[in-house]
Image (cartoon, rainbow, N blue to C red):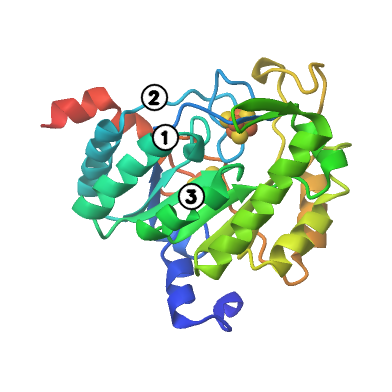
Amino acid sequence: DDQLDHLSDEIREKVQNHPCYSEDAHHYFARMHVAVAPACNIQCHYCNRKYDCANESRPGVVSELLSPQQAVKKTMAVAANIPQMTVLGIAGPGDPLANLERTFETFQTLSRDAPDIKLCVSTNGLALPDAVEELAKHNIDHVTITINCVDPEVGAKIYPWIYWNNRRIKGKKAAKILIKQQQKGLEMLVAKGILVKVNSVMIPGVNDQHLAEVSRIVKEKGAFLHNVMPLIAEAEHGTFYGVMGQRGPTADELQALQDSCSGDMNMMRHCRQCRADAVGMLGEDRGDEFTMDKIEDMD
Ligand code: SF4
Ligand code: SF4
């Protein structure tokens, strides 16, 4: 894999054992998500709170919410049954870092009881700078930040509000804080040698023209991988801006944007927009085999 030639051994290893960071690895290694994080600290226009966080996961899906204890039990059961399972991620159903206790209790127990499993987390970035130290302590090698913009004008069209210092902040002011936190979090993670994947949701007419700049900036700051995902806009997932009819990009539009970003940024092209409780190899979902009911029966 030429993409990896210039990397240090340590970073190369981190890339090669995570199915999302290496197109190659996704044929050999499996991942699972546990949905332990119900709350969120921002509002994205494309989010419908009835469903999983749309920043990492497939919209329109409701995952089974687990307690940290259940999540640990499930992880152990999956690891015992799927030997390729190398990575455990927390990606929802809300923002993992808006649920610090639940998220870190899960990580802490797993890093103690199953030290071989790699831990990863995805976040909208608002609470990231304050969490970096703790993430590093749990040996988390991979973090995904969803960054949809670097310009508050654009951000105000994507995020109606954020919840910040116990207050709801709206509009451009909110977007400015969110962007600042995301960029700061990115820099802090890179400084710690944690691999960062940036997810961006491509929203035609809103940030599609802007994402090449986002890609350039996050690359400059040391993000390892950029994953541009299409907005999946279907009436049953809710509205965007409170109006029906915001469309998602066509496959050609998505590919054109990925191509234009690709320069020397690594673009992820094999993301499957997994569920917040996905289990198995990418593209295969064995979550139904490992519901809490079935896991209880395994004992
Ligand atoms: Fe929804 Fe995720 Fe956005 Fe929070 S960060 S509003 S859960 S899409
Ligand atoms: Fe990997 Fe994409 Fe699935 Fe996340 S949503 S586990 S990045 S394939």
Residue hosting label 2? 64
Label 1 element class = loop
- Do the CB atoms of the residues marked 1 and 2 lie less than 8 Å apart? yes
Observer-nearest of 144 and 39: 39
Q: Nearer the viewer, mark 3 or mark 1?
A: 3
Label 3 element class = helix
Image spot of residue 21 (x, y percent): 53, 61
What separation in Å lies between label 3 and label 1 (alpha carbons)?
23 Å
Say if 113 sits above or below 64 in the image: below
Q: Which mark is residue 131?
A: 3
Q: Amino acid at mark 3?
A: Ala
Say if 246 sits above or below 101 in the image: above
Label 3 Cα neighbours within 10 Å, binned few <14 / some 14-19 / many ≥20: some
Q: Amino acid at mark 1?
A: Asp
Q: Amino acid at mark 2?
A: Glu
Say if 31 sits above or below 6 in the image: above
Label 2 element class = loop
Q: Which mark is residue 277?
A: 1
Image spot of residue 122 (x, y percent): 52, 46
Q: Residue at x 77, y 33 (%)?
A: 158
Earlier sequence position, callout 3 versus callout 2: 2
Quarter of the figure with the N terminus: bottom right
